[in-house]
Amino acid sequence: MRIIFFAGKGGVGKTSVAAATGVKTAEAGHRTVVMSLDVAHSLADIFDLDRGLIDEDRGSLTRIGKNLWIQELDIQEEIEKNWGDIHKYLSTLLNTTGLDEILAEELAILPGMEEVSLLLHINRYVRTKKFDVILLDCAPTGESLRFISIPTTLDWYIKKIFKIEKTVARYARPLAKRLYDVPLPGEDYFDAIEFLFKRLRGVDKILVDPEITTVRLITNPEKIVLKETQRAFMYFSLYKMSIDGIIMNRILPDDAGEAYFKDWRKSQKGYIRQAKAYFSPIPLFPVNLFRGEVLGMDSLRDLADQIYGERDPLNRFFKGEPYSFVKVNGKYQLRVKLPFIGKGDVELNKVSDELIIRVGSFKRHFVLPRQVAASDSVKARLDGEFLSVHFGS
Ligand SMILES: Nc1ncnc2c1ncn2[C@@H]1O[C@H](COP(=O)(O)OP(=O)(O)O)[C@@H](O)[C@H]1O
Ligand SMILES: [Mg+2]
């Protein structure tokens, strides 16, 4: 079983690269599914398929060739299927607070619900061994990064909040009914959360197991795109997901429009050099801008050949550990690989057995092992691209 995420900014070539990889792995005899989570679905289009066929059974698996399936997740449908009672409660809640019913239903879609749906699918496909290869065409980086924090957030929520909330709701319900118009969540709501959590169980382990899951970042040789790639790199590292390749797409070949594109080529060369330096030792896969758009099986196969050459796309092109606990002079240190951030950007908080590392708007709860949970002094220092957290007493 192999899972590969293709992530990057909008328009860099995620869908093309994910599809091209799928063509290759399917032809090599692996049962492959390419799944898309981008609301602007273009998987079917890039394979040059008849849109009508796909739209007919939106959201479901469609076999498009030998060993090859695609699935464009339909958010509305996923939410109805997976979030039924939770969504129902939230929209009733919003509705009773005076919101229009339709608006309430819209608003009751929590950020993260669609990502959880994706994780549910992954988990099910892994458990049922339906596929050998799952390729994920992610939503543009800003949004697609949220899903990585979901398993830990849910875990945390269930452990710390859920049990208390459930007990409180049970005892407060009869009283609250008389006092307020706002309904408290019923048993259905809690059961639904519990059921959801059950189906998610284990997916966090799958995501951070580098033998199974790796991330490939798609980027272009342009300043703003590269910057976003660095940010994505950092977040994936923080969440312990293993990045095994940077795909540098849309490089202008030397003979492209000699005069007109001269400056473009020059600046691209500079950014490619920079990118190699940043991401080293993770390999960079250069890909030229094609003469035309990438469309249909043949051009996808060409794209895959450009990316991987003779290499097997299922290889793990880089193996490294984004974070680890080490013992130095009898004291523990947590080393987290956080490339590309300055000291000011990291915020540390320790609350009993939890360490909260905040980087920008992202947050990660580490439930600390017993050995370090008791220490009352926590200091952090940036060593190159490692954040080392020192636990003392
Ligand atoms: N190397 C390339 N050469 C030419 N066209 C490309 C290349 N990579 C992607 N494209 C084209 O660029 C457009 C955007 O690519 P796409 O894979 O949909 O990006 P994303 O999924 O990241 O938004 C598509 O029309 C695709 O055919
Ligand atoms: Mg796309």
Image (tube, rainbow, N blue to C red):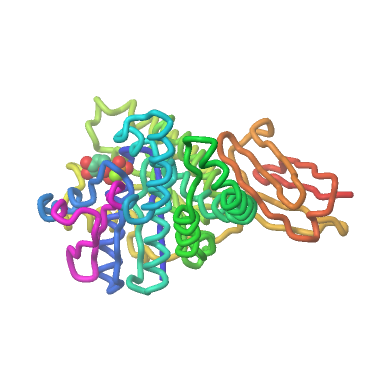
> Which residue is drawn at the image coordinates 36% and 44% (left, top)?
139
Snapshot quadrant of residue 254: top left
Q: Is residue 345 above or below residue 127?
A: above
**Residue 210 to residue 260: above or below:** below
Inspect this view and state whether residue 322 appears: no
Position above or below: 283 against 40? below
Q: Residue furthest right?
A: 393
Residue 382: percent from the left, percent from the top? 71, 40
Please state if 74 lies on the left or on the right of 387 as rendered.
Answer: left
Q: Quadrant of the N terminus?
A: bottom left
In the rendered image, residue 59 lying in the magenta stretch gets the answer: yes
Q: Does residue 59 appear left or right of residue 134 in this picture? A: left
Which residue does the image show at 39% across and 40% down from the upper left? 92
Residue range in magenta is 54-77
Q: Position of residue 284 (x, y in %)?
A: 44, 49
Farthest residue, direction front: 178
Query: Which residue is nearer to you in this view: 256 or 165?
Result: 165
Quarter of the image where one finds residue 293: top left
Quadrant for ligand 2? top left
Q: Position of residue 352 (x, y in %)?
A: 77, 49
The residue that appears at 71% across and 40% down in the rendered structure is 348
User: Residue 393, image x and y in percent?
Assistant: 89, 49
Q: Residue at x 65, y 44 (%)?
A: 385
User: In the rendered picture of this protein, how many numbered marks are placed on residues?
Assistant: 0
Residue 186 in view of the camera: yes
Does the stretch in magenta take in 68?
yes
The foreground one among 250 and 350 is: 350
